[in-house]
């Protein structure tokens, strides 16, 4: 299967009064047609900046892509003019933003907002665009689409607004859909419905999806592969099974340990100690070392390279060096992995 997207050594910085913030530091990954890649990590890890860079939405100034390539169907988006990018945005690459209320225009009907992209990118006559808008609202599970088309965003619930935003993103049959925390503001039941909807749409359209979230638990059932980001870098990447059942980076261990568990009798949630580093002055060595109770001496001195665990699984941790002492994940992580495996076996 050929690669739809290849990101190579992407670096994005923002110039502030305090100095240069290195928000994304050498990120590389690829994506095949019809595949879902989840990018996970805490707030400030560089997930959203990476997604905005893919869309050509880094505001300059203060932001800039310092180096790297973003190859979409072989064409480097970083070399395109704004006019050329406008032809790609919405048509080939579409984005579902975190807050549907800021994505929707409160003064326009839902129908007009969906039709706008169809008329602009597909040159559809208005009557045809209207019929397509009805079809899209039906696809995303909105009842009475003909009536709802004439209504305004304030007449929809949060979950329904998010469905409208998904319908808008799907309007021009994009090849790549970027979903930036699309379920964060929704309750758990609606969240599950939106995730199911996205899986269903992907089966029908064969679009590739980049799913950005801080919640590792959300991606277990939707992603084919998972990239774990920390301090502007990808620290571990692999198939969903690689990351959930055989995690190698201590930061991934921390994310898994902090997932709430229904099986656990402990009421207390486990948090990763400390805070992410200041990217005005990125730390020497492994950026996670200061928060890692099991850090090795070398973690504070040298940045680890990406070590190969298998053909699908890579992690940037000195624990994978041949001279590193053997170290298993903490017991809480091992218990969580066991629970997930048991849950998967019961579900199959």
Image (spheres, rainbow, N blue to C red):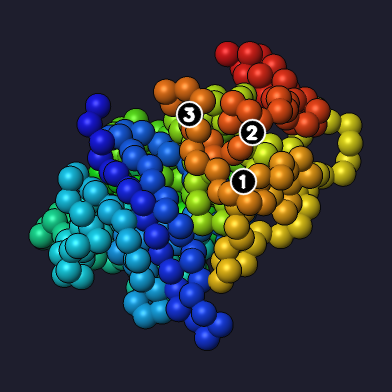
Image point (63%, 51%), residue name: 301
- Name the foreground residue: 8 vs 120: 8
For residue 189, what is the image quadrant?
top right
Earlier in the chain: of badge 3 and badge 2, it is: 3
> Are dots 1 and 2 in contact, CB under 8 Å?
no
Q: Which quadrant holds the N terminus?
A: top left
Does dot 1 land on a helix, a strand or a loop?
loop
Q: Which residue is mark 2?
A: 319
Q: Which quadrant of the figure contains the C terminus? A: top right
Q: Residue furthest bottom?
A: 17
* Residue depicted at 39% across the width and 60% down the height: 11
Secondary structure category for the residue under label 3: strand
Q: Where is 84 relative to 240, above or below?
A: below
Q: Position of residue 7 (x, y in %)?
A: 33, 48
In the rendered image of this protein, does residue 85 appear above or below residue 246?
A: below
What residue did someone put label 3 on? Answer: 308
Q: Nearer the viewer, mark 1 or mark 2?
A: 2
């Amino acid at each position: 299967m050929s690669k739809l997207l290849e990101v190579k050594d992407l670096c994005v910085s923002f110039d502030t009064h305090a100095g240069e913030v290195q928000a994304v530091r050498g990120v590389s990954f690829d994506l095949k047609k019809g595949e879902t890649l989840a990018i996970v990590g805490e707030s400030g890890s560089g997930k959203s900046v990476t997604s905005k860079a893919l869309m050509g939405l880094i505001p300059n100034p203060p932001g800039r892509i310092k180096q790297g390539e973003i190859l979409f169907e072989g064409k480097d988006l970083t070399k395109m003019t704004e006019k050329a990018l406008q032809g790609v945005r919405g048509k080939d690459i579409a984005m579902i933003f975190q807050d549907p209320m800021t994505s929707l225009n409160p003064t326009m009907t839902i129908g007009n907002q969906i039709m706008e992209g169809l008329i602009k990118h597909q040159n559809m006559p208005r009557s045809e665009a209207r019929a397509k808008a009805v079809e899209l609202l039906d696809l995303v599970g909105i009842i009475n689409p003909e009536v709802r088309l004439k209504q305004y965003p304030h007449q929809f619930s949060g979950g329904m607004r998010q469905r409208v935003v998904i319908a808008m993103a799907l309007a021009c049959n994009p090849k790549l859909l970027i979903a930036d925390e699309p379920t964060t503001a929704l309750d758990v039941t609606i969240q599950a419905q939106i995730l199911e909807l996205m899986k269903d749409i992907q089966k029908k359209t064969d679009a590739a999806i980049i799913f950005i979230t801080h919640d590792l638990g959300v991606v277990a059932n939707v992603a084919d592969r998972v990239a774990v980001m920390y301090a502007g870098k990808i620290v571990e990447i692999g198939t969903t099974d690689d990351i959930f059942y055989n995690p190698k980076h201590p930061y991934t261990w921390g994310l898994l340990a902090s997932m709430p568990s229904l099986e656990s009798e402990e009421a207390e949630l486990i948090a990763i100690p400390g805070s992410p580093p200041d990217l005005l002055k990125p730390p020497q060595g492994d950026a996670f070392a200061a928060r890692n109770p099991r850090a090795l001496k070398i973690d504070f001195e040298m940045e680890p390279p990406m070590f190969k665990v298998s053909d699908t699984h890579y992690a940037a941790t000195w624990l994978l060096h041949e001279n590193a002492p053997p170290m298993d994940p903490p017991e809480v992580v091992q218990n969580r992995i066991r629970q997930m495996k048991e849950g998967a076996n019961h579900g199959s």
